[in-house]
Amino acid sequence: MRVNLEKITKSFKKVEVLEEINLDIKDGEFVAFLGPSGCGKTTTLLIVAGIYKATSGLIKFDDTVVNKLVPKDRNIGMVFQSYALYSHMNVYQNLTFALMLQKKSKAEMDKAAKITSEMMGIGHLLDRKVGMLSGGQQQRVALGRALIKKPGLLLFDEPLSNLDARLRIHMRSEIKKIQHDLGTTAIYVTHDQIEAMSMADRIAVMNKGVMQAYDTPSNIHDKPKTLFVATFVGNPPMNVMDVTLQKENGKMLMKLAEGLSIEVPLSRTPKVIPKKVKMGIRPQDLEIGKTGGLPFKVYTIEPTGRDDVIICENNGSMFTGLATPGHNIKEGENVKVSFDMEKVQFFDAVTEKSILWN
Amino acid sequence: MIAVSKIRTFPWGKVVPFTILLIFSIPLILGIYWIIISTFSVSTRGLIPIDSAGNPGGLTLANWSFLKDPEVWRLTWNTFVLATTLTFGVLLVSSMAGYALSRINFKGRKTFLGSTMVLQAFPATTLLIATYFVLRFISGVPLLSVFGYDTLGGVILVSIATQLPLGIWLMKGFFDAIPWDLERAALIDGCSRWRTFRQILLPQIRPGIAALSVFSFIIGWSSFLIPYSFMTNQDTAVISTYINRLMQDTAPVNYSTVAAVGLFQLIPVIFFFIFTQKYLLAIFAGGMKGGS
């Protein structure tokens, strides 16, 4: 099922929570809504589900406008953060509740419950009360309940937030696999960028009711359209600092500090240069050494196993870099930070939009 | 080798509260003890049963002879009807009103919640005269006269009304504790809003419903002021007004009989309470935790 959102807005009383959301989702695509809490991603999802009504704009499923359809007529399945299982029913009843409401025969319900529960690995739990299940099992029941109707669109509202870290990683791949195998279009709301990056075909990054970017994970990461996207996506987050860009003798120079300028390669030269520019660089794209570059003082070192996260300070601004364990950088030491200029990002400091990718 | 000695400290944490509770319970315990003793004795001196000559002893079943009186059973039936209809009425209105107040955003919602709270603060006594006029008015309306003055229907109506603020607030609290997602899931699964209410939400607040029914039943069973004020007809009286009548007899009051009727009235309440106290506690525990 294709999904199209056209100029969707939503206001609660007089507070505008969504500003003209435009979105097209292809059939079978897995789209993640990513953003901090309160950014409007769940509101958008509930508008798609038909729980909330959009204040204005059109919602289309396969070219049909569905604005006026009630949730049950939209052919959707939804998985909630709290699972929202019917705790007074057993697993079988939870799974087949929607089918029962559609007045399906007992045989059909049994068959569907069997197929779905086996796919979800909960076949042996059918007559358990859901309160007796573990969090992971409840999650599977919730997923099964959404899938059993064979919906045209699957909606996920932070479904993994309540699971422990290990199970979350496991369910992540499982949900992705199931979605891929069934070929069902899916919208997945999350505030966890790793979930969004690892699962989605495309990510819609949202902040304060505005869609900041809608692109593939690699483009979101490598070609961030706004400063928000650049700093929200990526872990550890991107470093940002004020710089000045100047053209000298046909070369583009980035002035970091008095007497310290670096040449900007052609691939990163913006067409138009605004007055105030912010430069962004990911921690993995800078090098911390003894010579050459911007002077910093090492603030702390955080080992993560694979890399050591090095946080340095210069006049109150913090910079994060990575180093392979075994480096000889020590806390409190003076270091020099140099950048991989092929990887830098430039943003207009006023509009916070990228001047490379817009 | 180090001797492992078990140091048993005196359990002050248990003894002190227990003692305090005991001290405050003594008057109640003595009162109940006196009722039980006096129902089975001719007379009592303090807490000791005595016979007519004033000597200890004199146990008798004579005080319970009122059970042979068919009137008592008719009054018991009336009381039962009052208590059960009150319970059902309160449950029906409170659950629906509580849902609406918890989930639906309509004009005047806050005002309504506030005013029910204020109404709850009025003792029923202050409203007796006004209620009397309302009931007299209803008596004059054709078809509605079953809810008029001097009818069981009227008493039930007024009793339900006085119980509703508590019921509505209680039900609203329980509905508030149910996550929205549960309702959303039901809507997506294909329920109408009404069906969601009945099949998904009501089962979730079962502890609240149980607590409110027990509470309402006990209130209805032991209510006195409203039946006493609005039912002068002895045919439709309830046990509590019957006890009152016994005490107002011109002949010397037989307190042992009064005690026996009182105990008779208490028995269902005690049994009811024993079996349902865990639900009653839900009122005070406030809502439930997830899971089963």
Image: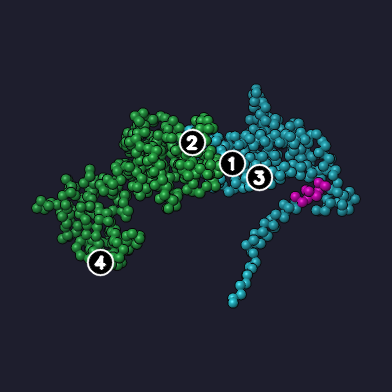
Which colour is chain B painted?
cyan
Q: Chain of mark 4?
A: A
A25 on left or right of B43: left
**Does label 2 or label 4 sit earlier along the sequence?**
2
Q: Main secondary structure of the magenta part?
A: helix
Callout 2–callout 4 Cβ contact below 8 Å? no
Q: Residues within 10 Å of mark 4 (few under 14, many from 20)?
A: some
Residue at point 81%, 46% (across, down)? B39
Instruction: Judge whether residue B33 is colored magenta.
Output: yes
Between the C-alphas of marks 1 and 4, the distance is 66 Å
Q: Are marks 3 and 4 in contact (CB under 8 Å)?
A: no
Looking at the picture, which amino acid does disc 1 mark? Arg
Q: How crowded is the residue under tag 3: few (<14 C-alpha within 10 Å), some, or many (20+)?
A: some
The residue at which mark 4 appears reads as: A334
Left or right of A92: which side holds A231?
left
Amino acid type of the residue tagged 2 in the rendering: Ala
The label nearer to you, 1 versus 2, is: 2
**Residue that badge 2 annotates:** A112
Q: Which residue is mark 3?
A: B276
Q: Could you say where residue B19 lies in the image, as x and y percent from the top left?
A: 68, 60
Residue receiving disc 1: B206
Measure the alpha-carbon separation of dots 1 and 3.
13 Å
Q: Residue at x 63, y 70 (%)?
A: B6
Letter of the green chain: A
Farthest right residue in view:
B53
To which chain does the residue with label 2 belong?
Answer: A
Q: Could you tell which of marks 1 and 3 lies nearer the N-terminus?
A: 1
Q: Which residues are magenta?
A: B32-40
Seen in the picture, residue B19 relative to A104 is either above or below; the reply is below
Foreground pick, A73 / A123: A123
